[in-house]
């Protein structure tokens, strides 16, 4: 299936319906998702506080591109293609670590943290190390969020940063540490993973733990910016406390920020609704600030609460495999066993992730059947999914037809 065929499938989509099967399952359609989106857009990779010291790095693969993100001796965070300039081996083979230099394990070519080649053995006369630095990828910061773009020319990031920064700033994410991290591989197309995230129509039946604190109709109103007196009062109160809360999204629909109230009495995503962490992240004295939600297609959604925050990162591994990495973020001075109990902190989202994974895998398996035909989304409960699929189709159509 070539570019023209993928374009035809995109154009064949009925409005407010799920996508044609091949767009979820076909290898060539997946190649186009990589070429047109994942290899061209900004992708969330990790947090600045994970790279606190020079030499700390995160390695990951964005589509076809192995990447390493490392803090230099000058304090800069840089992204490099994790591809040795000798014979192409990955230089960093672990997902994270701390090194003095970036040393390729194959023949020990040694790079400085700014990518410069410092040492290459046995190369003989006339070899100029300066000609072989690691190749850089685009790297941009939004608060504590590190984004990378592997395209030659990266799209604008400043507009997104300007819009999102005021929402993130009061949560003081730079003061965080990762209390817990999980990476799961879901046997489903990345679009099914994001579709599942963009609605809570399934929450009632699927997420008993989450529903102790999460209220579907308030969340739906919050993400839609609906006229709802309870929501308005909540937004007024939070904004008076210095926390931007009212729905904001860009015209193209790639990102959105909004704050939603939680269930009555609930202050956090825990089984009993009580905060999981005794040290708050934000500086305000407003106890009940609900959850700030922010997503940026195609790679991330996030929840910020008063006491902790959750970041989620998607990476596509193939047409039917997606890695979902969740990080539970707490104040860097919060001590496990003193300020938080790990089980209390992580139980709800560990359970929710496992449930969502099952939903995605079952959906992928059904969509892969030759009998599958595109079905209608609920315009009342699945507006978020329609929004995501519309964004996907608009981006793909524009790029495939240009
Ligand atoms: Fe890296 Fe040879 S491939 S040193
Ligand atoms: Fe879910």
Image (cartoon, rainbow, N blue to C red):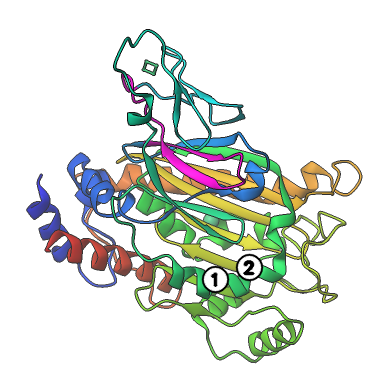
The residue that mark 2 highlights is 168
Across and down, in percent, residue 166 comes to: 61, 75
Please give the count of numbered marks on the rendered protein. 2
**Image quadrant containing the N terminus:** top left
Q: Dot 2: what SS?
A: helix
Foreground of the two, 310 or 75: 75
Q: Is residue 106 above or below residue 379?
A: above
Asked if the stretch drawn in magenta spans residue 74, the answer is yes
Across and down, in percent, residue 15 comes to: 24, 72
Number of other residues with Cα within 10 Å of mark 2, as a class: few under 14, some 14 to 19, many 20 or more: many
Q: Is residue 45 visible?
A: yes
Number of other residues with Cα within 10 Å of mark 1, as a class: few under 14, some 14 to 19, many 20 or more: many
Asked whether disc 1 touches disc 2, contact meaning CB atoms under 8 Å apart, the reply is yes
Asked where in the image residue 379 lies, by quadrant, the reply is: bottom left
Q: Residue at x 70, y 84 (%)?
A: 239
Asked if the stretch drawn in magenta spans residue 256, the answer is no
The residue that mark 1 highlights is 164
Q: Residue at x 29, y 56 (%)?
A: 153
Please indicate whether residue 240 sits to the left or right of residue 83 in the image: right
Q: Residue at x 38, y 52 (%)?
A: 192
Q: Which residues are magenta?
A: 66-88
């Amino acid at each position: 299936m070539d570019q023209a065929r993928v374009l035809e499938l995109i154009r064949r989509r009925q409005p407010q319906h799920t996508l044609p099967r091949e767009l979820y399952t076909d290898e060539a359609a997946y190649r186009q998702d990589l070429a047109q989106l994942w290899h061209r857009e900004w992708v969330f990779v990790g947090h600045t506080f994970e790279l606190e010291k020079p030499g700390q790095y995160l390695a990951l693969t964005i589509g076809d591109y192995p990447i390493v993100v490392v803090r230099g001796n000058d304090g800069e965070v840089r992204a490099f293609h994790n591809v040795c300039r000798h014979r192409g081996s990955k230089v960093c083979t672990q997902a994270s670590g701390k090194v003095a230099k970036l040393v390729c394990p194959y023949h020990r070519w040694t790079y400085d943290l700014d990518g410069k080649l410092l040492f290459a053995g046995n190369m003989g006369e006339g070899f100029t190390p300066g000609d072989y630095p690691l190749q850089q990828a685009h790297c941009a910061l939004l608060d504590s969020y590190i984004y990378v773009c592997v395209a030659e020319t990266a799209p604008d990031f400043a507009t997104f940063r300007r819009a999102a920064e005021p929402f993130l700033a009061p949560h003081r994410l730079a003061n965080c540490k990762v209390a817990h991290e999980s990476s799961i591989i879901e046997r489903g197309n990345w679009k099914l993973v994001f579709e599942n995230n963009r609605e809570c129509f399934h929450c009632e039946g699927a997420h008993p733990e989450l529903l102790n604190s999460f209220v579907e109709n308030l969340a739906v109103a919050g993400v839609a910016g609906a006229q709802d007196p309870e929501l308005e009062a909540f937004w007024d109160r939070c904004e008076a406390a210095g926390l931007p809360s009212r729905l904001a999204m860009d015209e193209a629909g790639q990102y959105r920020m909004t704050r939603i109230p939680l269930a009555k009495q609930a202050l956090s995503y825990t089984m009993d609704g009580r905060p999981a962490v005794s040290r708050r992240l934000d500086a305000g004295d407003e106890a009940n600030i609900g959850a700030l939600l922010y997503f940026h297609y195609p790679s991330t959604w996030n929840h910020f609460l008063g006491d902790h925050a959750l970041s989620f990162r998607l990476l596509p591994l193939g047409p039917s495999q997606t890695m979902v990495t969740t990080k539970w973020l707490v104040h860097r001075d919060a001590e496990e066993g003193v300020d938080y109990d790990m089980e209390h902190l992580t139980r709800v989202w560990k359970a929710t992730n496992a449930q969502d994974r099952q939903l995605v895998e079952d959906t992928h398996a059904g969509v892969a059947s030759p009998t599958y035909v595109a079905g209608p989304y609920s315009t009342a409960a699945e507006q978020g999914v329609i929004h995501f699929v519309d964004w996907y189709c608009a981006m793909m159509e524009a790029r495939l037809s240009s």
